[in-house]
Amino acid sequence: MLTLLNDTINRLYPFYSSACLAGAALVSIFFGLSDRKGIKVFLIFLSVCSIFASLFFNIFSFLKSGSFSDFLFVFDKLQVVEISIILFSAINILLLFSIYNFRKQSFSKILIIFQVAVFLITIFILSNNLIMIFCSLALAVAGIFQLVTLLAGQSDIRTESEYLVKNQIIRFFMVASFSLIVLFTGFSLIFGVLDFKTFVQIVQSDKLENPLLRTGLFIIFTGIFTYLFIFPLQSAYIKLIKRTEGISALIIWFFYYPAGIFLFLKLFDIFATFTGKNIFLNAALYFIALVCIAGGNIGAVKTTSLRRIMSFLFLATLGFSILSLAFFSTRLIESAAVLRLIIANTVFLIFIYFPVYSIFLEIERQKGSDSIENIRGFARNNKYSGIILILILLSFAGLAGTSGYIVKIIFIQPFIDILKAQTAGWTGSSFIILNYTGSIAAIAGWIFFAANIIRMLIYMVRSPGKAGKILVPKFYHIYILFFCLILIYTGIAGLMELTGSTSILTGIPVFSFNF
Amino acid sequence: MNIQLIGLIGFAIFLLGLFGATYYRSFLSIMISFQLLIVYSVINFFSFSLFIYVLSSWDKTFVFFAFIAIYTLLFMIVFYNYSKQTNIYGLEVLQDLRLFKFDRSDWWGEDNADTIK
């Protein structure tokens, strides 16, 4: 019996984290129809325990058993980090969801869908085979769709605004479906070139010059582009975030978007193979990144809606990730630095968005609208949480000493390197104009980005005026303090590493961690 | 029938689907365009397996699962759309669901673009 159990547990590897989530979802199904308060509390407790257990097994099993790879799945350092990101987001979403929706009649059912959605995303992260990636992503998006629609509310539409919410949800997920179908088309073309099963096989094959393969890959990257709603295709995303229920925005930011980013990371080796040779491709990458950064910043500066500001700044941050790809295409930075930056950007967004958005959501709940006018005088009325929020926002702007600058310094470093090389008589590579343009635009984009944050800060420290007094519950003080401490902690660890005291605080080298 | 001809017919279907999905504003037109795109993928999988490779049972199963996955998502969207009707003819028929609409309000200013006419 013990041998059978041991054998089963061994066979489950590397799905320990997924198994915990699936187990919790299965148990929850038996309580799904109940609306009793005790049952709801039990389901929250079960979900939290399952997510923490997943997080533990995710890291512990990797440390104990090492990498895993087969026909369908892969489990390596990158997958461990990606699953941890999703699980950490899940804990926070669960917390905020429970606060705002506990009294909802369908609370238990939404919680079960939530567990299933997280489970499907972890399966997607582990997927290695082309069709397996597609299946798990499609089902994960279906799970996210269910969550967003259930959170949106009642079954009957009574008002015009409810009708507009429905339309925007449909529009958003139709774009997502479109990108998935485009991905599927790309996979079908790749299948025509060779009987490929994984992306690694494509990189290792001698068919890289095959036009059908290239068309397939082009279609797949177009699919990822539309999936991520990158400028100028952002319409459905911006409108959905503005109109949907508050927690749905977090689900889109930290379940839907990371899935797209992780899909790209699965393709990163292929991307690396094709970039660097073609100047038009490199120029296109710079163009997309700059449009994304500029569009995100301009959109944020011209609106007074906090939700729109947050969603535009999210896209601008995504633009910085794309810029790192552009830098890589002209070989300004190495592939390891790109991976590090994309993951760091995603983690950084989590540590900024959860505390900031949770406060904004509470203010929105009290005031009934998401206008920036509502945060006027917030730091004066709530000195404790005001100071913490200011620190977090300054970190978002890239303040040295907090973790915000760690992401930004990767953009500044190549620029300094070019200038140093130029003064030493280096004539530069064939992409020198692109390098200069990109570096200068990155710095300008950062300044513009910081200006957007400072605009919010000014509102927070001004006299409250007509906005009146807003007081946030004490729970939020502790919640945002936790994030603020982590931001400062990693920021100081990074600074110490820069000055030569390698990884004293974290034990992990912040600037040279490789996946 | 050879693979080139199948490829050309398939590509024509793909272009039709792509045009429909990016141009139309009505829910059903976009859904039909999605079907055309999926049909193109089916044609690719089957033609390549007939003329170039032999699909193993694993591959067949997975392609089948891929169809189930995407149709599950599409079915959910269709179900959601029709389960939340307003019973107001104008609202349902004139709804604008263009996937890639380029509004000024998506770049600049406040979100006031799609007020109901």
Image: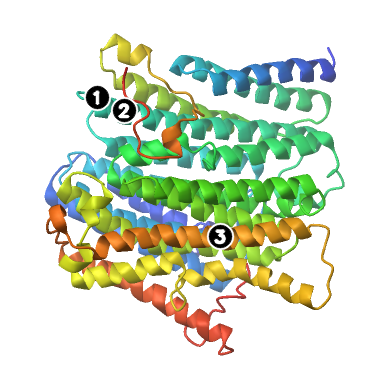
Query: x and y percent of residue A132 in the render?
Result: 60, 42
Name the quadrant of the C terminus of chain A: bottom right
Q: Which comes sooner in the sequence, label 3 or label 1?
A: 1
Name the quadrant of the N terminus of chain A: bottom left
Q: Numbered disc 3: what chain?
A: A
Q: How many residues crowd mark 2 within 10 Å: few (<14), some (14–19), many (20+)?
A: many
Q: CA distance from mark 3 to mark 1?
A: 41 Å
The type of residue carrying mark 2 is Leu
Query: x and y percent of residue B42 in the render?
Result: 66, 23
Residue at the image point whose x is 32% and y is 17% from the top: B117
Please tell me whether residue A107 is drawn above or below residue A490 in the rendered image. above
Query: x and y percent of residue B92 in the render?
Result: 34, 15
Q: CA distance from mark 3 to mark 2?
A: 36 Å
Q: CA distance from mark 1 to mark 2?
A: 6 Å
Horizontal relation, residue A347 to residue B18: left or right: left
Residue at the image point whose x is 72% and y is 64% from the top: A332
Q: Can residue B79 be seen by looking at this rendering?
A: yes
Q: Which comes sooner in the sequence, label 3 or label 2?
A: 2
Residue at the image point whose x is 50% and y is 15% from the top: B29
Which residue is more in the foreground, A120 or A249?
A249
Q: Which residue is mark 2?
A: A164
In the rendering, which numbered label is found on residue A160? Answer: 1
Tell us which disc is closer to us: 3 or 1.
Answer: 3
Q: How many residues crowd mark 1 within 10 Å: few (<14), some (14–19), many (20+)?
A: few
The type of residue carrying mark 3 is Ala
Q: Numbered disc 2: what chain?
A: A
Q: Numbered disc 1: what chain?
A: A
Q: Which residue is mark 3?
A: A444
The quarter holding residue B34 reads: top right
The kind of secondary structure element at disc 1 is helix
Horizontal relation, residue B70 to residue A151: left or right: right
